[in-house]
Image: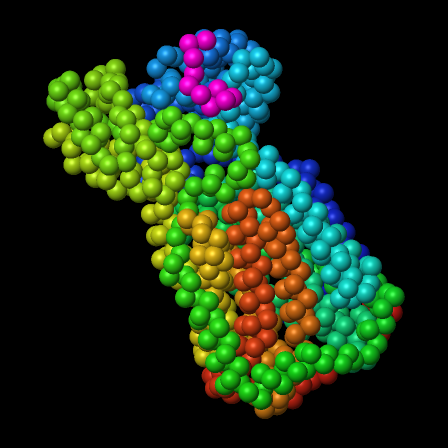
Amino acid sequence: MFGRIGRAAVLRPWVTISAWIVAAVALAVLAPQLKSTSDQADFLPSHYESVQAAKVQERAFPQHEQPAAVAVFQRADGQKLTAADRTEVAEITSRLQGLGIDRIKRVETSPQAVSPNGRIALASVVATVKDPYDPGLMKSVGKLREQARPMLQGTGLKLGVTGQAASALDSKEASGDTDSMIMSATLVLIVVLLLLIFRSPLIAVLPVLIIGLAFMVATGLISTAAEIGGLKADSSISAILIVVLFGVGTDYILFLLFRHREQLRSGQAPKQAMITAVSLVGETIASAAGAVIVAFLALLLSTMGMLRTMGPSLAISVAVALLAGLTLVPAVFSLLGTKAYWPSKSWRKQPKNAVAGRVGRLAARRPGAVAAVTGGLLAVLAGGVLGFRAEFDTTSSLPQHLESVQAMRDMQRGFPAGETDPTTVYLEKSGGPALTEGQLDAYGAALGKVDGVGQVSPAVLAGDGRVARYSVVLDHKPTGEKAIGVVAGPLRDTAHRAAPEGTRALVGGTTAVLGDIENAVNHDYKVVFPAAGVAIMLILGLLLRSVVAPLYLMVSVALGFGATLGATVWLFQNSQGKDGLLFTLPVIVYLFVVAIGTDYNILMVARLREEIEQGRPPREAAARAVARCVPTIGAASVILAGTFGVLMLAENSMLQQMGFAVAFGILLSAFVMAMLLVPALTTLLGRRAWWPGLRPAAATEPVPVRDDDRTLV
């Protein structure tokens, strides 16, 4: 099948290239735009308590307004606010209110908004939209900051704006430079590394153009599926699509070009060499892509809406990369022939590959020692996973010089940390008489006794008197681990236990949502990972026609996953003293290390099987397979790891964690697992590794084709 695909692309290159260009242009013009969404229901299922609480709020208190941001006033000298200072705060607040900034409904303060120690005064910024991450609102918060600066001159006061909208603005601005830096560095890195590997300017540039065309097609297909098929997708997926497409797309191109160059060195004509390359590695590329696709589709089993959204979108992008690798790449390079490698002449002669040869001989001659050392190294690194602590406070990773971070720290000098985003408790009575004043007071008193609760506001009743709302200010930062622990544990337990007979209590708000997300993530780890593992094993079994090989391959993959996470824990959490690591880090490692990193294992075992089928004994097959695959795997993994490694240059500590984990995991998958552990285990098992499907046979020579032929002879 793959031989026929290769022939069609190579012998009709202009038809193939034209079809891709037409598809890209048509989808770019006709496909709908991806829409952004921040609906809470898109992230958690309706059975979670925080989502139910949000629905009660919409039904019973539709006019309830939560400040989107908080302006924090203090004296520049750090002393207590004087009466004149408080008057200035009121005047500045009034002037900000009078500006009529878009999407800002009110800017208000009161005498009660001064801290008990008299050092901090607050002004609430109430928005006309409920979503604190609304782009227009974030822009308006930035404008409010700019307009406030001249108002402070001569007052002796300083002002900082914090809260959800302000933190979102700072995060976006801080990551804006990072995004452009990552994109620029990615393109430069790919071009430079390809230039060093092949010493050809055309090969350095063409993959970038090919993947760019594939990106246009993938984005158009995703947005069309979202519009027609009901697939949920978010515009924020574009950034991750770029990384995935450049990662797997470059891998598939390298797999093909290295094999093409190998066939040229054996004496085949350029077109025949490309057809043979597609025939030989097409199944490998398809299997590698299939493993990544099913791993991404396993995210559909997640209870987290953002992961269910991400899975199909990434699966579509990998499918497009696969199609491009099997059709567009052969078509483009068949037109160029050996000119694609100009000015290098490396395609004419066999390389010495001294290092690759030594690695192959090591894995073949001492498989037991190699397996023991590499497996032991992975196991030791995986031990760090036992100390993993999830960090849900994404703002803690922001650079400390940002205004929202500094203002939050200043506010905590006078108010409980939870003042910017209180937790909300709803008490709802389903039947009978309305809630009594005594019941409301007693219930509020019970909430106030929970350790970690700083203040509970008096109950606010809905119009029918059957739903009461309590605003609970925590002593801890709303998005921090301690606050999540209080809300998900003692506060919820007390809220449910103290609810009068005939009522139900629901705890909602940002902190409650994060607590439910933590539960959802823990659930997903138990469901998504095993499902993806089984699916990948089935694909490996079909590729290798073996029951044994997929088993030890998945054991090595699991060790690699643990080693990657463990090393990240050792470096960031233990050595740097971080409270915890990004809560989505295990999923990120799963997506980019386990799923994509499996490509290298698949390439290696496919070549091992090919050598065995040609009648070579296991040790010789391992030596030859490793020697032939090391350059391909090394080049592909360095490019992919370098792409993610750029994230370590960011100021955001969570981006640094992500960059290190993925880059380290990719290199671990390539240089330890694919080059050493897997060949060593395969050599130890011998022909048993391929049971029951191995049928050794002599290699057959491909039917030749002349470069100027339009049809095969």
Report the front residue among 397 and 158: 158
Question: Can residue 85 be seen?
Answer: yes
Give yes or no for residue 628 being in the magenta stretch: no
The quadrant of the image that shows the N terminus is bottom right
Residue sitting at x 66%, y 83%: 358
How many callouts does the rendering have? 0
Q: Is residue 713 above or below residue 511?
A: below
Give yes or no for residue 82 being in the magenta stretch: yes
Magenta span: 75-84
Report the front residue among 497 and 208: 497
Q: Is residue 624 above or below residue 668?
A: below
Q: Is residue 519 above or below residue 410?
A: below
Q: How is the image coloured?
A: rainbow
Query: x%, y% of residue 334?
Result: 80, 64
Residue sitting at x 56%, y 21%: 145
Q: Is residue 612 above or below residue 708?
A: below
Residue sitting at x 42%, y 27%: 411
> In this image, 348 relative to 366: left or right?
right
Query: x%, y% of residue 508?
Result: 32, 33
Quarter assignment of residue 265: bottom right
**Dominant secondary structure, magenta:** loop
Residue sitting at x 55%, y 11%: 99
Report the front residue among 384 and 232: 384
Question: Can residue 609 be seen?
Answer: no
The quadrant of the image that shows the C terminus is bottom right
Query: x%, y% of residue 95?
Result: 52, 9
